[in-house]
Image (cartoon, helix red, strand yellow):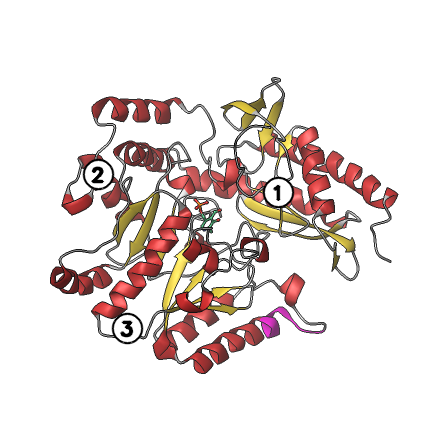
Amino acid sequence: MSQIIYPTTNFKQTETLTIARGDGAYVYDSEGKQYLEGLAGLWCTSLGYNNRELIEATTEQMGKLSYSHMFGGKTHQVGIDLAEKLSAMVPVENAKIFFGNSGSDANDTHIKMLRYYFNAIGKPQKYKIISRERSYHGVTVASAALTGLPPNHTHFDLPFDALGVLRTDAPHYYRSGLSNETETEFVDRIVNNLEQLILREGADTIAAFIVEPITGASGVIVPPEGYYQKVQAVLNKYDILFWADEVITAFGRTGNDFGCTTVGIPKPDMMTLAKQLSSAYMPISASVIRGDMYQAMIEPSNKVGVFGHGYTYSGHPVACAVSLKTLEIYQRDNMFAHAAKTGAYMQKRLAEFKNHPLVGEVRGKGMIAAIELVANKQSGLAFTNGLVGNFAMQACQNNGLICRAVAGSSLAFCPPLIVTEAQIDEMIEKIAISLTQTLDFVSREGLMVK
Ligand SMILES: Cc1ncc(COP(=O)(O)O)c(C=O)c1O
């Protein structure tokens, strides 16, 4: 066992797999075994591994300027260029952009940005943030408090109240719809719950509502049609900002430029971006706000002398250079259209598993999907712990496919955007074999519930 404390790993667990190299949509372990990367690393390696153009952009920038900070307005051209390009791409009005290093710190930045902004406009009491059950927004103290998954809370004593985190329903009809309730009735019920929460807390105390347009780590929840339009209407009514955490869904993942486009939110007020922004070649994140929010903070920051927030690596030039090249490749190669086409094919092929005795629901959009395994197909009864999901994930791995068991027993799939239909076929074949092996295991262990 090495000296590493592994992230999101049981302390009791020892090393499971040593990845040695990657090429295209594949990675190879230290024994040379090939795996199709069915989760694009952690939902991030959009352009795959060993992309020569990205490597060249990185090394060229390393040679030119390997580091420079951005405190006090010190800047560099590649950072300015990236911000300009991003600002033109995102659906946020006159977008202004703060750079960080990870999705978690981008969300932390926005929590502070919201406080700074509402203090600036004379509404200091408007600081609370509504987040959903089963959401994932990161693991720093503040972003973990936004996250709505128990494993990220247990033993950490997070300061939910101090941060003003409020919780509302996850829009997952399959898991949370009541018997005899239609999808529309479900949406109306949970949107009404949202409105009641706002009324209970007082709209003038609530700053923003944060959502992943389509979730990832919580099991790829695709909300029913119309959900976001009804949510947006409530937020408009009470003057609450819409904050899209697009750390996974941005840059083609859902078959469009942004998840907001896919789910029909034309103008989010704030966005957080990371992962596919650099195709994971370098760590970088972006916290995006409306231009008028930035304008409102200019004088107040002048009064205190500074906006006292920034990271050593905010706007790291090498990360900016590789991100800029990544965005250029997305546009030049029509990567989002490619993702839409291959994504539609992937969803069609994954839907073939709907009749499998272990499968409760197959869901997804574009190039992100999940298969939820259940203990009783008719009732949708969930397995009581993650044992079956983990078995299935391990079976996939043994069969040369990397994926991830999330939210108990859902298998998540999110291959690099560059995958071909032939590679999707390969993925489907490996899933099929792995599900057969999982069914044998479940039957042997008597884990199905009649
Ligand atoms: C939607 C979302 N937000 C935030 C994060 C946190 O990003 P990071 O792991 O880079 O801190 C993640 C990570 O998976 C995510 O999926």
Name the residue that disc number 1 marks: 10
Cβ at disc 2 under 8 Å from ligand 1: no
Of badges 2 and 1, nearer the viewer stands 1
Say which residue appears at 29% left-offset and 57% top-offset: 289
Q: Position of residue 400 (x, y in %)?
A: 66, 28
* Residue closest to the eye, 289 or 260: 289
Magenta stretch bounds: 180-186
Q: Quadrant of the N terminus?
A: top right
Residue 69 shown left or right of residue 241 in the figure: left
SS under mark 2: loop
Sequence-wise, the earlier of marks 2 and 1 is 1
Q: Which residue is mark 2?
A: 69
Q: Is residue 183 magenta?
A: yes
Callout 2 touching callout 1 (CB < 8 Å):
no
Q: Is mark 1 within 8 Å of ligand 1?
A: no
The reply, left or right, for residue 351 in relation to residue 63 is right
Q: Residues within 10 Å of mark 1 (few under 14, many from 20)?
A: few
Q: Which residue is mark 3?
A: 124
Q: Give the residue type at disc 2.
A: His
